Image (tube, rainbow, N blue to C red):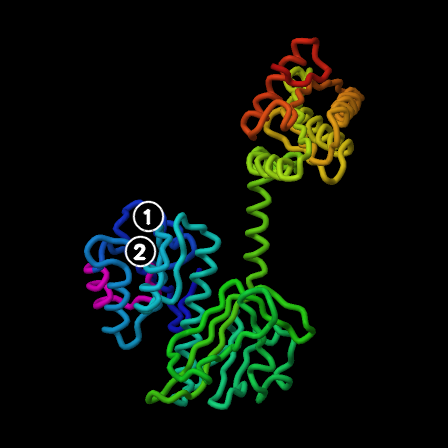
Amino acid sequence: MTVSLLSGTIPVILIVDDDEVMRMLLHQFLEGEGYAVIEAENGHAALEILGKESIDLIILDIAMPGLDGPEICAHICSSMSDPPPVLMITALDDEKSIERSYNAGAVDYIRKPLRWPVLKNRILFILGSHRAKQELELLSRNYEMILDAAANGICGIDSNRLISYVNPAALKMLGYSNDEVKGRDCRMVFKVTASGGDFVEDCCPYFEQQDINDTICYDEGRMQRKDGTSFPVDFRSTPIKQNQRLKGGVLVFQDITERHEAAELIRYMANHDPLTNLPNRNYFRRRLPQAISLANRHGRLLCLLFIDLDRFKPINDQFGHGVGDIVLMQVAARLRSTLRTSDSVCRLGGDEFVILLESTESLEGAILVAQKSIESLNEPIEAGDHICFIGASIGISVFPNDCHDAETMLRHADIAMYEAKKKGRNCWQIYSD
Protein backbone atom coordinates (compact mmCIF):
# COMPACT_ATOMS: atom_id res chain seq x y z
CA MET A 1 0.00 0.00 0.00
CA THR A 2 1.28 3.47 -0.89
CA VAL A 3 1.41 5.84 2.08
CA SER A 4 1.28 9.60 2.10
CA LEU A 5 4.60 11.32 1.91
CA LEU A 6 3.92 13.54 4.92
CA SER A 7 0.85 12.53 6.87
CA GLY A 8 1.17 8.74 6.89
CA THR A 9 -2.18 8.34 5.12
CA ILE A 10 -2.85 7.03 1.65
CA PRO A 11 -2.07 9.78 -0.92
CA VAL A 12 -5.14 11.23 -2.60
CA ILE A 13 -4.88 11.95 -6.32
CA LEU A 14 -7.41 14.14 -8.13
CA ILE A 15 -7.99 13.29 -11.81
CA VAL A 16 -9.38 16.20 -13.88
CA ASP A 17 -10.31 15.17 -17.44
CA ASP A 18 -13.43 15.61 -19.55
CA ASP A 19 -12.82 12.23 -21.20
CA GLU A 20 -14.77 9.63 -19.20
CA VAL A 21 -12.77 6.70 -20.62
CA MET A 22 -9.45 8.33 -19.71
CA ARG A 23 -10.70 9.04 -16.18
CA MET A 24 -11.76 5.41 -15.81
CA LEU A 25 -8.38 4.07 -17.03
CA LEU A 26 -6.44 6.42 -14.75
CA HIS A 27 -8.73 5.59 -11.82
CA GLN A 28 -8.20 1.85 -12.23
CA PHE A 29 -4.42 2.20 -12.61
CA LEU A 30 -3.96 4.53 -9.62
CA GLU A 31 -6.15 2.44 -7.33
CA GLY A 32 -4.09 -0.58 -8.38
CA GLU A 33 -0.98 1.29 -7.22
CA GLY A 34 -2.55 1.92 -3.81
CA TYR A 35 -3.65 5.54 -4.17
CA ALA A 36 -7.00 7.05 -3.20
CA VAL A 37 -8.60 8.60 -6.27
CA ILE A 38 -11.13 11.39 -6.81
CA GLU A 39 -12.46 12.37 -10.25
CA ALA A 40 -13.59 15.67 -11.71
CA GLU A 41 -14.94 16.09 -15.24
CA ASN A 42 -14.13 19.80 -15.56
CA GLY A 43 -12.30 22.69 -13.94
CA HIS A 44 -15.21 23.99 -11.89
CA ALA A 45 -15.80 20.58 -10.34
CA ALA A 46 -12.08 20.30 -9.57
CA LEU A 47 -11.96 23.65 -7.80
CA GLU A 48 -15.02 22.71 -5.74
CA ILE A 49 -13.35 19.45 -4.66
CA LEU A 50 -10.13 21.27 -3.74
CA GLY A 51 -12.15 23.49 -1.43
CA LYS A 52 -13.35 20.45 0.52
CA GLU A 53 -10.72 17.73 0.21
CA SER A 54 -7.00 17.43 1.01
CA ILE A 55 -5.29 16.45 -2.26
CA ASP A 56 -1.68 15.23 -2.63
CA LEU A 57 -1.42 15.38 -6.43
CA ILE A 58 -3.53 16.63 -9.33
CA ILE A 59 -3.43 14.94 -12.72
CA LEU A 60 -4.86 17.53 -15.09
CA ASP A 61 -5.70 17.31 -18.81
CA ILE A 62 -4.45 20.32 -20.79
CA ALA A 63 -7.23 20.45 -23.40
CA MET A 64 -10.72 20.72 -21.89
CA PRO A 65 -13.83 22.73 -22.75
CA GLY A 66 -14.51 25.78 -20.64
CA LEU A 67 -11.57 26.24 -18.28
CA ASP A 68 -8.63 24.45 -19.86
CA GLY A 69 -5.79 22.82 -17.92
CA PRO A 70 -3.40 25.80 -17.69
CA GLU A 71 -6.24 28.11 -16.54
CA ILE A 72 -7.27 25.66 -13.81
CA CYS A 73 -3.64 25.19 -12.76
CA ALA A 74 -3.05 28.95 -12.55
CA HIS A 75 -6.18 29.38 -10.42
CA ILE A 76 -5.11 26.58 -8.06
CA CYS A 77 -1.56 27.88 -7.64
CA SER A 78 -2.68 31.47 -7.06
CA SER A 79 -5.58 30.75 -4.70
CA MET A 80 -4.01 28.12 -2.40
CA SER A 81 -1.23 28.85 0.08
CA ASP A 82 0.24 25.36 -0.32
CA PRO A 83 -1.16 23.95 -3.58
CA PRO A 84 -0.60 20.28 -4.43
CA PRO A 85 1.70 19.54 -7.38
CA VAL A 86 0.02 19.45 -10.78
CA LEU A 87 0.97 16.87 -13.42
CA MET A 88 -0.37 17.74 -16.86
CA ILE A 89 -1.38 15.10 -19.41
CA THR A 90 -1.83 16.01 -23.04
CA ALA A 91 -2.37 14.62 -26.50
CA LEU A 92 -1.20 17.94 -27.95
CA ASP A 93 2.25 18.39 -29.43
CA ASP A 94 2.64 22.16 -29.38
CA GLU A 95 5.17 23.99 -27.27
CA LYS A 96 2.77 26.84 -26.52
CA SER A 97 0.38 24.69 -24.47
CA ILE A 98 3.25 23.08 -22.59
CA GLU A 99 4.84 26.47 -21.90
CA ARG A 100 1.49 27.81 -20.65
CA SER A 101 1.22 24.82 -18.32
CA TYR A 102 4.65 25.40 -16.79
CA ASN A 103 3.99 29.13 -16.48
CA ALA A 104 0.73 28.35 -14.71
CA GLY A 105 2.57 26.31 -12.09
CA ALA A 106 2.51 22.71 -13.35
CA VAL A 107 5.50 20.70 -12.16
CA ASP A 108 5.61 18.32 -15.12
CA TYR A 109 3.66 16.88 -18.05
CA ILE A 110 3.29 13.51 -19.75
CA ARG A 111 2.00 12.75 -23.24
CA LYS A 112 -0.91 10.58 -24.33
CA PRO A 113 -1.13 7.71 -25.04
CA LEU A 114 0.04 7.13 -21.48
CA ARG A 115 2.86 4.69 -20.77
CA TRP A 116 1.89 3.29 -17.39
CA PRO A 117 5.43 2.46 -16.08
CA VAL A 118 6.51 6.03 -16.94
CA LEU A 119 3.42 7.50 -15.26
CA LYS A 120 4.02 5.37 -12.17
CA ASN A 121 7.61 6.59 -11.79
CA ARG A 122 6.69 10.18 -12.62
CA ILE A 123 4.06 10.22 -9.86
CA LEU A 124 6.49 8.75 -7.34
CA PHE A 125 9.10 11.32 -8.33
CA ILE A 126 6.71 14.28 -8.15
CA LEU A 127 5.35 13.21 -4.77
CA GLY A 128 8.90 12.69 -3.54
CA SER A 129 9.99 16.10 -4.84
CA HIS A 130 7.00 17.79 -3.26
CA ARG A 131 7.78 16.08 0.00
CA ALA A 132 11.39 17.30 -0.09
CA LYS A 133 10.34 20.87 -0.77
CA GLN A 134 7.82 20.89 2.06
CA GLU A 135 10.20 19.30 4.51
CA LEU A 136 13.01 21.72 3.79
CA GLU A 137 10.62 24.65 4.13
CA LEU A 138 9.74 23.27 7.54
CA LEU A 139 13.44 22.98 8.36
CA SER A 140 13.91 26.66 7.52
CA ARG A 141 11.36 27.41 10.28
CA ASN A 142 13.32 25.30 12.77
CA TYR A 143 11.30 22.12 12.35
CA GLU A 144 13.51 19.05 12.15
CA MET A 145 12.39 16.56 9.53
CA ILE A 146 13.77 13.13 8.87
CA LEU A 147 14.66 12.58 5.21
CA ASP A 148 16.87 9.54 5.57
CA ALA A 149 14.13 7.14 4.50
CA ALA A 150 13.56 8.86 1.16
CA ALA A 151 14.30 6.73 -1.89
CA ASN A 152 15.18 9.79 -3.98
CA GLY A 153 18.47 11.59 -3.50
CA ILE A 154 17.88 14.76 -1.49
CA CYS A 155 20.36 17.51 -0.65
CA GLY A 156 19.98 20.81 1.17
CA ILE A 157 22.08 23.81 0.10
CA ASP A 158 22.66 26.84 2.30
CA SER A 159 22.87 30.48 1.19
CA ASN A 160 26.60 30.10 0.40
CA ARG A 161 26.05 27.14 -1.93
CA LEU A 162 27.48 24.80 0.69
CA ILE A 163 25.92 21.39 1.27
CA SER A 164 24.12 21.44 4.60
CA TYR A 165 22.30 18.12 4.35
CA VAL A 166 22.49 15.06 2.14
CA ASN A 167 20.48 11.89 2.61
CA PRO A 168 21.78 8.30 2.43
CA ALA A 169 20.08 7.65 -0.92
CA ALA A 170 22.02 10.53 -2.49
CA LEU A 171 25.31 9.38 -0.93
CA LYS A 172 24.76 5.85 -2.22
CA MET A 173 24.00 7.05 -5.76
CA LEU A 174 27.04 9.34 -5.89
CA GLY A 175 29.51 7.10 -4.06
CA TYR A 176 30.44 9.61 -1.36
CA SER A 177 30.45 9.48 2.44
CA ASN A 178 28.67 12.16 4.43
CA ASP A 179 31.98 13.66 5.64
CA GLU A 180 33.20 14.02 2.04
CA VAL A 181 30.30 16.24 0.97
CA LYS A 182 29.06 18.06 4.08
CA GLY A 183 30.14 21.71 3.86
CA ARG A 184 31.47 21.47 0.30
CA ASP A 185 30.41 23.69 -2.58
CA CYS A 186 27.49 21.94 -4.28
CA ARG A 187 29.04 22.55 -7.71
CA MET A 188 31.98 20.32 -6.79
CA VAL A 189 29.71 17.38 -5.96
CA PHE A 190 26.61 17.67 -8.14
CA LYS A 191 27.79 17.57 -11.73
CA VAL A 192 24.85 17.28 -14.09
CA THR A 193 24.40 17.36 -17.84
CA ALA A 194 21.10 17.71 -19.64
CA SER A 195 22.48 17.03 -23.12
CA GLY A 196 24.87 14.12 -22.79
CA GLY A 197 27.95 16.34 -23.19
CA ASP A 198 30.31 17.68 -20.54
CA PHE A 199 29.02 17.93 -16.97
CA VAL A 200 28.77 21.73 -17.01
CA GLU A 201 25.17 22.45 -15.99
CA ASP A 202 24.87 24.67 -12.91
CA CYS A 203 22.90 22.65 -10.36
CA CYS A 204 21.75 25.85 -8.58
CA PRO A 205 21.53 28.63 -11.22
CA TYR A 206 19.29 30.74 -8.97
CA PHE A 207 22.37 31.84 -7.00
CA GLU A 208 23.60 33.62 -10.14
CA GLN A 209 20.19 34.65 -11.47
CA GLN A 210 18.19 36.07 -8.60
CA ASP A 211 14.99 36.26 -10.69
CA ILE A 212 14.68 32.45 -10.83
CA ASN A 213 11.90 31.41 -8.46
CA ASP A 214 10.86 28.08 -9.89
CA THR A 215 12.25 24.58 -9.90
CA ILE A 216 15.04 23.85 -12.39
CA CYS A 217 14.48 20.51 -14.12
CA TYR A 218 16.92 18.27 -15.96
CA ASP A 219 14.85 15.33 -17.17
CA GLU A 220 16.63 12.37 -18.69
CA GLY A 221 19.98 13.95 -17.82
CA ARG A 222 23.12 12.35 -16.45
CA MET A 223 24.86 12.80 -13.12
CA GLN A 224 28.51 12.11 -12.39
CA ARG A 225 29.61 9.90 -9.51
CA LYS A 226 32.71 10.36 -7.38
CA ASP A 227 34.62 7.79 -9.47
CA GLY A 228 33.88 9.64 -12.74
CA THR A 229 31.21 7.25 -14.01
CA SER A 230 27.69 8.54 -14.57
CA PHE A 231 24.08 7.39 -14.46
CA PRO A 232 20.79 8.60 -16.00
CA VAL A 233 18.87 10.89 -13.70
CA ASP A 234 15.78 13.04 -13.30
CA PHE A 235 17.06 16.11 -11.43
CA ARG A 236 15.20 18.94 -9.71
CA SER A 237 16.75 21.99 -8.07
CA THR A 238 14.42 24.32 -6.16
CA PRO A 239 15.33 27.68 -4.58
CA ILE A 240 14.28 28.20 -0.97
CA LYS A 241 13.29 31.79 -0.28
CA GLN A 242 12.17 33.56 2.87
CA ASN A 243 10.78 37.09 2.71
CA GLN A 244 11.87 37.19 -0.96
CA ARG A 245 15.48 36.49 0.06
CA LEU A 246 17.32 33.42 -1.19
CA LYS A 247 18.12 31.21 1.79
CA GLY A 248 19.38 28.16 -0.08
CA GLY A 249 18.08 25.36 -2.23
CA VAL A 250 17.00 21.75 -2.29
CA LEU A 251 18.22 19.21 -4.83
CA VAL A 252 16.14 16.13 -5.53
CA PHE A 253 17.18 13.47 -7.99
CA GLN A 254 16.23 9.96 -8.98
CA ASP A 255 18.34 7.27 -10.61
CA ILE A 256 16.29 6.25 -13.65
CA THR A 257 18.53 3.40 -14.81
CA GLU A 258 15.72 0.88 -14.33
CA ARG A 259 13.36 3.10 -16.32
CA HIS A 260 15.90 3.26 -19.16
CA GLU A 261 16.40 -0.50 -19.05
CA ALA A 262 12.64 -1.04 -19.11
CA ALA A 263 12.31 1.31 -22.09
CA GLU A 264 15.11 -0.53 -23.89
CA LEU A 265 13.40 -3.85 -23.19
CA ILE A 266 10.11 -2.52 -24.54
CA ARG A 267 11.85 -1.28 -27.69
CA TYR A 268 13.61 -4.64 -28.10
CA MET A 269 10.40 -6.61 -27.64
CA ALA A 270 8.60 -4.39 -30.15
CA ASN A 271 11.24 -5.14 -32.79
CA HIS A 272 12.15 -8.77 -32.15
CA ASP A 273 10.41 -12.10 -32.40
CA PRO A 274 10.11 -13.58 -28.86
CA LEU A 275 10.67 -17.17 -30.03
CA THR A 276 13.74 -16.85 -32.25
CA ASN A 277 15.06 -13.45 -31.07
CA LEU A 278 15.33 -12.45 -34.72
CA PRO A 279 14.21 -8.99 -35.81
CA ASN A 280 10.49 -9.14 -36.57
CA ARG A 281 8.14 -7.77 -39.23
CA ASN A 282 7.89 -4.43 -37.44
CA TYR A 283 11.67 -3.99 -37.60
CA PHE A 284 11.86 -5.21 -41.21
CA ARG A 285 9.17 -2.78 -42.41
CA ARG A 286 11.33 0.10 -41.17
CA ARG A 287 14.70 -1.32 -42.15
CA LEU A 288 13.97 -2.21 -45.79
CA PRO A 289 13.23 1.38 -46.99
CA GLN A 290 16.39 2.56 -45.20
CA ALA A 291 18.46 -0.14 -46.89
CA ILE A 292 17.02 0.76 -50.31
CA SER A 293 17.81 4.44 -49.77
CA LEU A 294 21.38 3.58 -48.76
CA ALA A 295 21.89 1.24 -51.71
CA ASN A 296 20.53 3.86 -54.09
CA ARG A 297 22.84 6.53 -52.67
CA HIS A 298 25.95 4.38 -53.09
CA GLY A 299 24.93 2.72 -56.36
CA ARG A 300 24.92 -0.79 -54.87
CA LEU A 301 22.79 -3.87 -55.34
CA LEU A 302 20.37 -4.87 -52.59
CA CYS A 303 19.02 -8.41 -52.54
CA LEU A 304 16.00 -9.69 -50.63
CA LEU A 305 15.45 -13.41 -50.07
CA PHE A 306 11.93 -14.45 -49.09
CA ILE A 307 12.03 -17.87 -47.38
CA ASP A 308 9.06 -20.14 -46.77
CA LEU A 309 9.75 -23.46 -45.05
CA ASP A 310 8.72 -26.67 -46.80
CA ARG A 311 7.10 -29.54 -44.87
CA PHE A 312 6.82 -27.50 -41.67
CA LYS A 313 3.05 -27.71 -41.16
CA PRO A 314 3.06 -31.54 -40.87
CA ILE A 315 5.60 -31.24 -38.03
CA ASN A 316 3.26 -29.01 -36.07
CA ASP A 317 0.29 -31.25 -36.85
CA GLN A 318 2.05 -34.52 -36.02
CA PHE A 319 4.34 -33.59 -33.11
CA GLY A 320 2.76 -30.44 -31.70
CA HIS A 321 3.72 -26.77 -31.54
CA GLY A 322 6.41 -27.39 -28.92
CA VAL A 323 8.43 -29.39 -31.43
CA GLY A 324 7.57 -26.85 -34.15
CA ASP A 325 8.98 -24.04 -31.98
CA ILE A 326 12.26 -25.93 -31.54
CA VAL A 327 12.48 -26.36 -35.31
CA LEU A 328 11.91 -22.63 -35.87
CA MET A 329 14.63 -21.73 -33.37
CA GLN A 330 17.03 -24.09 -35.17
CA VAL A 331 16.06 -22.55 -38.51
CA ALA A 332 16.83 -19.07 -37.15
CA ALA A 333 20.24 -20.19 -35.88
CA ARG A 334 21.16 -21.84 -39.19
CA LEU A 335 20.08 -18.86 -41.28
CA ARG A 336 22.10 -16.54 -39.03
CA SER A 337 25.19 -18.68 -39.52
CA THR A 338 25.06 -18.26 -43.30
CA LEU A 339 25.27 -14.46 -43.18
CA ARG A 340 27.90 -11.80 -42.74
CA THR A 341 27.46 -9.21 -39.97
CA SER A 342 26.40 -6.57 -42.50
CA ASP A 343 23.43 -8.72 -43.60
CA SER A 344 20.34 -9.58 -41.59
CA VAL A 345 17.64 -12.22 -41.26
CA CYS A 346 14.14 -11.48 -39.92
CA ARG A 347 11.16 -13.63 -39.07
CA LEU A 348 8.01 -12.21 -40.63
CA GLY A 349 5.79 -14.68 -38.80
CA GLY A 350 4.81 -18.34 -38.91
CA ASP A 351 7.35 -20.17 -41.05
CA GLU A 352 8.25 -17.14 -43.20
CA PHE A 353 11.68 -15.52 -43.00
CA VAL A 354 13.51 -12.90 -45.03
CA ILE A 355 17.21 -12.30 -45.57
CA LEU A 356 18.39 -8.81 -46.48
CA LEU A 357 21.76 -8.78 -48.22
CA GLU A 358 23.27 -5.30 -48.04
CA SER A 359 26.89 -6.21 -48.77
CA THR A 360 26.59 -8.47 -51.80
CA GLU A 361 28.33 -7.21 -54.94
CA SER A 362 26.50 -9.38 -57.45
CA LEU A 363 23.41 -11.45 -58.01
CA GLU A 364 25.62 -14.52 -57.80
CA GLY A 365 26.29 -13.67 -54.17
CA ALA A 366 22.57 -13.75 -53.41
CA ILE A 367 22.19 -17.06 -55.23
CA LEU A 368 25.07 -18.49 -53.20
CA VAL A 369 23.39 -17.42 -49.93
CA ALA A 370 20.08 -18.92 -51.09
CA GLN A 371 21.75 -22.20 -52.00
CA LYS A 372 23.65 -22.35 -48.69
CA SER A 373 20.44 -21.63 -46.79
CA ILE A 374 18.60 -24.45 -48.57
CA GLU A 375 21.48 -26.87 -47.96
CA SER A 376 21.63 -25.89 -44.29
CA LEU A 377 17.90 -26.34 -43.80
CA ASN A 378 17.96 -29.71 -45.54
CA GLU A 379 20.07 -31.10 -42.71
CA PRO A 380 18.04 -33.09 -40.13
CA ILE A 381 16.84 -31.11 -37.11
CA GLU A 382 16.76 -32.71 -33.66
CA ALA A 383 13.72 -31.53 -31.72
CA GLY A 384 13.41 -33.37 -28.44
CA ASP A 385 12.85 -37.03 -29.22
CA HIS A 386 12.10 -36.33 -32.87
CA ILE A 387 14.22 -35.96 -36.00
CA CYS A 388 12.59 -33.51 -38.37
CA PHE A 389 13.23 -32.92 -42.05
CA ILE A 390 12.27 -29.67 -43.72
CA GLY A 391 13.34 -27.65 -46.74
CA ALA A 392 12.94 -24.12 -47.99
CA SER A 393 11.54 -22.37 -51.04
CA ILE A 394 13.25 -19.03 -51.63
CA GLY A 395 12.26 -16.09 -53.81
CA ILE A 396 14.85 -13.45 -54.69
CA SER A 397 14.19 -9.80 -55.56
CA VAL A 398 17.00 -7.41 -56.53
CA PHE A 399 17.14 -3.63 -56.25
CA PRO A 400 17.33 -1.83 -58.64
CA ASN A 401 16.96 -4.63 -61.22
CA ASP A 402 13.28 -5.43 -60.65
CA CYS A 403 12.03 -2.90 -58.08
CA HIS A 404 12.49 0.65 -56.80
CA ASP A 405 10.68 0.68 -53.48
CA ALA A 406 10.28 -1.51 -50.40
CA GLU A 407 6.70 -2.62 -51.01
CA THR A 408 7.45 -3.77 -54.55
CA MET A 409 10.65 -5.51 -53.49
CA LEU A 410 8.87 -7.55 -50.81
CA ARG A 411 6.00 -8.41 -53.19
CA HIS A 412 8.39 -9.52 -55.93
CA ALA A 413 10.37 -11.72 -53.54
CA ASP A 414 7.08 -13.26 -52.35
CA ILE A 415 5.97 -13.92 -55.94
CA ALA A 416 9.33 -15.50 -56.75
CA MET A 417 9.06 -17.72 -53.66
CA TYR A 418 5.71 -19.08 -54.89
CA GLU A 419 7.30 -19.76 -58.28
CA ALA A 420 9.94 -21.80 -56.45
CA LYS A 421 7.12 -23.74 -54.76
CA LYS A 422 5.60 -24.45 -58.20
CA LYS A 423 8.95 -25.71 -59.46
CA GLY A 424 8.89 -28.47 -56.88
CA ARG A 425 9.94 -26.73 -53.62
CA ASN A 426 13.31 -26.80 -51.91
CA CYS A 427 14.83 -24.45 -54.48
CA TRP A 428 15.31 -20.75 -55.23
CA GLN A 429 13.81 -18.53 -57.89
CA ILE A 430 14.78 -15.01 -59.04
CA TYR A 431 11.89 -12.66 -59.76
CA SER A 432 11.27 -12.00 -63.42
CA ASP A 433 8.46 -10.18 -65.22
Q: Quadrant of residue 68?
A: bottom left
Image side of residue 72 versus residue 84, left or right: left
> Is residue 55 magenta-colored?
yes
Rendering coords of residue 113 (x, y %) = 40, 48
Q: Taking 17 as reference, is 143 above or below it?
A: below
Q: Please name the residue shown 45% across and 86% down the image.
A: 248
> Is residue 217 magenta-colored?
no
Image side of residue 391 versus residue 209, left or right: right
Q: Disc 2 on helix, strand or loop?
A: strand
| Sequence-first disc among 1 and 2 | 1
Q: Please name the residue shown 66% across and 76% down the image.
A: 226
Q: Taking 418 as reference, is 89 above or below it?
A: below
Image side of residue 51 versus residue 117, left or right: left
Mark 2 Cα-neighbour bin, 10 Å: few <14, some 14–19, many ≥20? many
Rendering coords of residue 413 (x, y %) = 62, 22
Give the residue type that dot 2 points to: Asp
Q: Disc 1 on helix, strand or loop?
A: helix
Q: Taking 54 as reference, is 342 above or below it?
A: above
Rendering coords of residue 98 (x, y %) = 35, 60
For the magenta stretch, what is the residue range? 44-61
Give the residue type that dot 1 points to: Met
Q: Quadrant of residue 206?
A: bottom left
Residue ID for mark 1: 22
350 or 304: nearer the eye?
A: 304
109 or 120: nearer the eye?
A: 109
The quarter of the picture where the C terminus appears is: top right
Residue ID for mark 2: 61
Q: Please name the residue shown 59% across and 87% down the image.
A: 184
